[in-house]
Image (tube, helix red, strand yellow):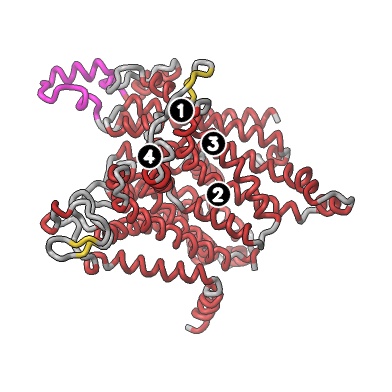
Amino acid sequence: MTAASAPANILAAQYGRDRIALVAFWLLMALFCAAIAAPWIAPQNPYDLAQLDILDAKLAPGATSSTGLSYWLGTDDQGRDMLSAILYGLRISIAVGIASTVLALGLGLTAGLIAARAGGWIDGLIMRVVDLQLSFPAILVALILLALTGQGIDRIILALVVVQWAYYARTVRAAALVEMRKEYVDAAVCMGVGNARILLRHVLPNVLPPVMVVATVQIAQAIALEATLSFLGLGLPITEPSLGLLIANGYAHLLSGKYWISFFPGLALLVTIVAINLVGDRMRDLLNPRLR
Amino acid sequence: MLSYVLRRLAWSTATLFVMSLLVFAGVYAIGNPVDLLINPQADQAEIARATALLGLDRPLWEQYWLFFCGALGGDLGISFAASVPAITLILERMPATLELALTAMLIAITLGIPLGLLAGLRPRSWLARSIMALSTLGFALPTFWVGLMLIMVFSVQLGWLPTTGRGATVDVFGIPLSIFTADGLRHLLLPATTLALFKLALLIRLARAGTQDAMLQDYVRYARAKGLSERAVVRSHVLPNILIPIVTVAGLELGSLIAFAIVTETVFAWPGMGKLLIDSINVLDRPVIVAYLLATVCLFILINLLVDLLYAVLDPRVQAGDTQ
């Protein structure tokens, strides 16, 4: 127990020395908690039409409804409380970001390890697919996929997995090749340990930490990409509005000066992405042996 | 060198072929275009006739072959929405997108290299820290959000710049361009800045890392030892060395700028290929979607090929390392 927690404690203490990163960490935790608890802490359920009052449409931030509810961040064109909509939107955005990153990481790890261990034509085939995919920008690949498959939370997760896995596969393959030249792998081979066991029990634990750090920052990228696709009207359907869709809904009103319908969801998106980036950057600096 | 060029060309051709297969399979095999084109009350015989007319009753490989031959001759079908050849629509819109992307790249380069150089020369100064904070923000900010905020501040609140569109254009060699008219420039400024921000962040990091690396090299020490001023050391020794990777990356990133222009064009209603793509997806105008994809894939492959070849010329180690 102590042996396992000691490095974690040292890491936590080192992490805390960067005050900005520390603030970002707590901010991120607060956002996560708010996203998870959205149905209980939001002033109204923004997608229960019975709770919406069209007479309250497009109220400025701080206005009060006929029933005495305060709209701290204003309302949209259907009288929806923006604070509630943002909490629910944050929930969807973060869920999609994490789900797609975890799935892509799993797929990329598997493909990368197989390529590194198998070598030969299997390695060649996997890496050519990776090369092909990485020569096109993520947004273009995701757009094409969504244009072909249509909208939906499962489709957007699929699109985000497809655009991310190749990057992990390449990183994992390179790291695994370095690890497999080391003596402990030779020792395991001499002991007659099987292929699968060498990969999973010996190579994987050494490859995983740096890739996990990359994945942290990738969650932010996934959230940003999902928001962009939803903004373009190709991501999530109107029944599951993420932050990107909220921003898109407010776009038309932005030009008439009703900034809050777009601005606050954008601010929530921005704070989430920046916080994840700051935490990820700090972790990368701490775990990068070259910078020590 | 020749074998490298040939190998690279073969890879490009293979990529183009695979992409054309994927685009074909994706757009033509998923869903039946007949359902969209024909009257819903049509009987079985009419559906069969329409299917035969479109060649959809033939085996898939034969359909692909016809599509492939058509594509080689520049025939990618007729737009459902505009009733003109899809490729014509794309080519009409291409100058606007290229103008936007190239202006954005120009902004990123002219600001990114000096800022990165400054940040790299004195990494601990407050100026360097501010520049790096700007770069972090540039990476994190979603493009469309930046665009919206720029519109909100400069167009709606301050009223300095127009919100959308391309403004007045002049024909240069028959190609309409905004950049040479005052009105066009005013329209171009916000979208180009939005699009440039991410690349600016990237070039700042590259220039800074390159500068920090170069300052530790022997040639900088000897240049100082022979009495050159700091300015001369930077101008004639540091700058040329950091430019090689920057030129390469700037070239490679041009493709991603064209892709990201889809977002910027939608926000600013800039009449380029990207906006056309989104509009076409919304009305399921398949021939235009296919034409956009193939045109973009060709552009990308061309850019990647040119950059790789340029890189091989600039850095001979690439040719040796490529076989590994």
Q: Are marks 4 and 3 on the same chain?
A: yes
- Closer to the chain start, of discs 2 and 1, is 1
Q: Amino acid at mark 2?
A: Ala
Residue that carries the numbered disc 2 in the rendered image = B201
Q: Amino acid at mark 3?
A: Leu
Marks 1 and 3, Cα distance to the nearest angstrom?
Answer: 15 Å
- Closer to the chain start, of discs 1 and 3, is 1
Residue that carries the numbered disc 4 in the rendered image = B267
> Dot 2 falls on which chain?
B
Of B20 and A282, nearer the camera is A282
Q: Is residue A82 above or below residue A283?
A: above
Q: Residue at x 28, y 18 (%)?
A: B55
Q: Is residue B140 above or below residue B164?
A: below
Q: Is residue B28 above or below residue A213?
A: above
Q: From the viewer's perspective, is A122 left or right of B292?
A: right
Marks 3 and 2, Cα distance to the nearest angstrom?
Answer: 15 Å
Q: Is residue B5 magenta?
A: no
Residue that carries the numbered disc 3 in the rendered image = B254
Q: Is residue B35 magenta?
A: yes
The part of the chain drawn in magenta is B32-59
Element assignment for label 4 = helix
Marks 2 and 1, Cα distance to the nearest angstrom?
Answer: 24 Å
Q: Amino acid at mark 4?
A: Val
> Dot 1 falls on which chain?
B
Q: Amino acid at mark 1?
A: Ala
Element assignment for label 1 = helix
Q: Residue at x 14, y 22 (%)?
A: B39
Q: Are marks 4 and 1 on the same chain?
A: yes
